[in-house]
Amino acid sequence: MIKSKICEILGIQYPVFQGGMAWIADGKLAAAVSEGGGLGIIGAGNAPASYVREQVRIVKSLTKKPFGVNIMLMSPHADEVAAVVVEEGVPVVTTGAGNPSKYMKDWKAAGIKVIPVVASVALAKLMTRLGATALIAEGGESGGHVGELTTIVLVPQVCDATELPVIAAGGIADGRGAAAAFMLGAVGIQMGTRFLSAEECTIHPTYKEKILKATDLCTMVTGKRLGHPVRSLRTRFSQNYAKAEYGGMPDDELEALATGAFRIAVQEGDIEKGCFLSGQIAAMVKKEQPAAQIVKEVMDEAEAVLRRADSWLG
């Protein structure tokens, strides 16, 4: 069994994080991943603090194992959610879409292990100086908000820039990707899109079906003009948004066009109005299965791949 430093730090069985996907990663999914030996993570997204508190309590009712909350720092509710994780005794916080500097002192004082998502070496160095527990280096192959660098380029550079444990994210869906991440210097992986196929993932059936039928060229990035690029499945919504983005629509109208689109995709499966977040590896997601089985299957395959590689070198 593959064990690493992050397993010891967090008290988890496998070095596998489940991505904190907005409106997708709820308490039920996070609890299932944690029960399966990984780190389940609630996605706060743009949700109000009351929703996050409710999901945290759902996790606590379903598992006694470690879990986390991902806070999207551009959310209008970020301040309130930052307080909720302290009040509810959340053991791990991951952050995305911004710089968590202003919250770090309070989180650390509460004993929370803080693991920011970084998309650049500069941010990795800053988070190291501020006392982060570990870092998630996420490449642009991922779904949701994305940076410019690919995973295979970003991860080794972040590993070289910090002594903190590094979790690789973006474009990882199986044991081959996990093994590659370990060879790049990471001590664990984070997967988002792969967990969309989990039985415990409560996305709309249309969303899940589109993931299971995805092809290699099924995603696109929109939102660059406003400075918040997002990777999602090619749907009528995303294609219409791209036309509006580069067709001269005013910024405020463009912003309004995307408001609520993540939630609509997850809850209603509406391809006209919903933004279906997905990483580039969607085509590698072939079947629905329990979250715990996904965690174990990926780690078992990674171990087999690494052993095979070792035999070639021997």
Image (tube, rainbow, N blue to C red):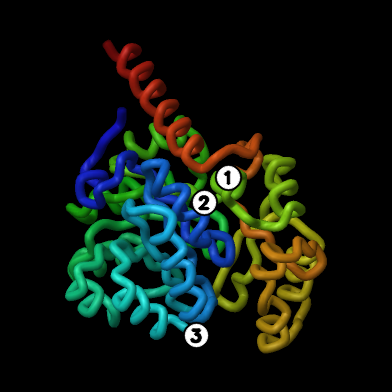
Of the image marks 2 and 3, the number of the one nearer the N terminus: 3
Identify residue type, mark 2.
Answer: Gly
Residue 260 image position (x, y, % from top left): 67, 76
Residue 25 image position (x, y, % from top left): 52, 59
Image position of 26 (left or right of 103): right
Q: Secondary structure at mark 1?
A: loop
Of the image marks 3 and 1, the number of the one nearer the N terminus: 3
Identify residue type, mark 1.
Answer: Ala
Q: Secondary structure at mark 3?
A: loop
Of the image marks 1 and 2, the number of the one nearer the N terminus: 2
Distance from disc 2 to disc 3, alpha carbons, whole Å, reads 23 Å
Give the residue number, with chain letter if any, for mark 1.
198
Distance from disc 1 to disc 2, alpha carbons, whole Å, reads 11 Å
Residue 187 image position (x, y, % from top left): 29, 42
Residue 105 image position (x, y, % from top left): 21, 78
Q: Secondary structure at mark 2?
A: loop
Give the residue number, with chain letter if any, for mark 2.
192
Q: 285 and 143: which one is in front?
A: 285
Label of residue 76 in the image:
3
> Residue lying furthest front in this view?
61
Instruction: Categorize mark 1 by other alpha carbons within 10 Å: few (<14), some (14-19), many (20+).
Output: many
Instruction: Categorize mark 3 by other alpha carbons within 10 Å: few (<14), some (14-19), many (20+).
Output: few
Residue at 18% across, 67% down: 131
